Image (spheres, grey):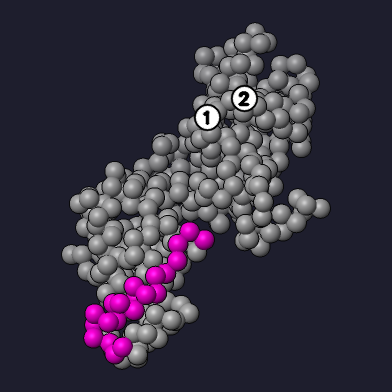
Amino acid sequence: MKQARRDRERQMGRKPTGELRRGWTTGACAAAATKAAYVALLTGRFPDPVAIRLPGGEQPRFDLAETGLRAGQAVAAVVKDAGDDPDVTHGALVRATVRRGESGTGVMFIAGDGVGVVTRPGLALAVGEPAINPAPRRLIRELVAEVARDWGDAGDLEVTISIPDGETLARRTANGRLGIVGGLSILGTSGVVIPYSCASWIHSIQRGIDVARAAGLSHVAAATGSTSERAVQAWYGLADVALIDMGDFVGGTLKYLRRHPIPRVTLAGGFAKLAKLAAGHLDLHSSRSTVDLPALAELLAERGAAGELVAHARDADSANQVLELAQGIGLPLADDVALRARRVVLGQLDGACSVEAMIFDRDGMLIGHAKGW
């Protein structure tokens, strides 16, 4: 009952209360399924549950949800458990099919149903390769080598990883924008899912920057939400590959851009989000930062607003209420916030990129702009 309640909370977008349960990445699941299938190919028996050792020393055990064995081929699958993380692949079936490969070829990876293929340069994998990331590949190869030693086999295998419904699930990820077509990516550096660490989101931000750089783009837009993203794309006529779904992770985005710069960067968002950034917050999530209403009131005072209006702003219920007060008397508060937000960003980038900040309202109209070029 307790876990069912936590699952419902996660599905509704609410963070479960109490100590959060960790889970396992798609990479760990694919590795476990591969090991089970390879053992069965050699012995005729599936280890169930199957145990693997992760890079950090954890030794999880996975129950097999599916098995199949016929001449020259073995199939095993596990159900991904992401713990209490709101992972899009939680509950997905991760299947490995192993067949003997040609002598001396080692482990060859194939994208099965629901696993994507790389179509754009800039990722850690070559164009045409299955979207099975380097760390899961390394883990799978290590496990294959371990089993091969134990049973005196050469370890030359074709490993096909598939995720039924993976192509549908991938529509809820950034894969299409990154040029990964046909399904999901097999991810995971440590093999462990840390609940609400948002590692997959930050990973997609970094890969989005990598792909934009590989495409030779000189201008990208990082947006806090879908409304501002659509608005800035229309404003400049940007291709999808130039859009970085930054969300609340301004700090992580800027840190990566500082090391991997792109000449021009537009930061786009709503008034409240950029008001947080203007105050120096680099994580804009509501649980980790709040709008400094007195600071917004002070901006109005600097613009010559009457004392009574400044007092109303200081006691306002929200950033947008302060904005309405400013707009009512024609003060460009959104421009001032954009300017301060741009200064914060420039300080983080240390000259790596030219920056502008754009603030859009809920209808996608530009209401604040700090130009950078």
State the residue position of label 2. Answer: 53
Depth check, front residue: 324 or 369: 324
Label 2 amino acid? Arg
On screen, residue 202 above or below 75:
below
Q: Position of residue 211 (x, y in %)?
A: 36, 47
Does residue 90 belong to the magenta stretch?
no
Measured in 3D between alpha carbons, the distance from the residue under mark 1 to the one under mark 2, in whole angstroms, is 14 Å
Question: Which quadrant would the C terminus be assigned to in this image?
Answer: bottom left
Q: Quadrant of residue 343?
A: bottom left
Mark in front: 1 vs 2: 2
Q: Position of residue 6 (x, y in %)?
A: 71, 54
State the residue position of label 1. Answer: 137
On screen, residue 143 above or below 238:
above
Q: Give the mark nearest the N terminus, 1 or 2.
A: 2
> Is residue 117 visible in the rendered structure shown here?
yes
Label 1 amino acid? Arg
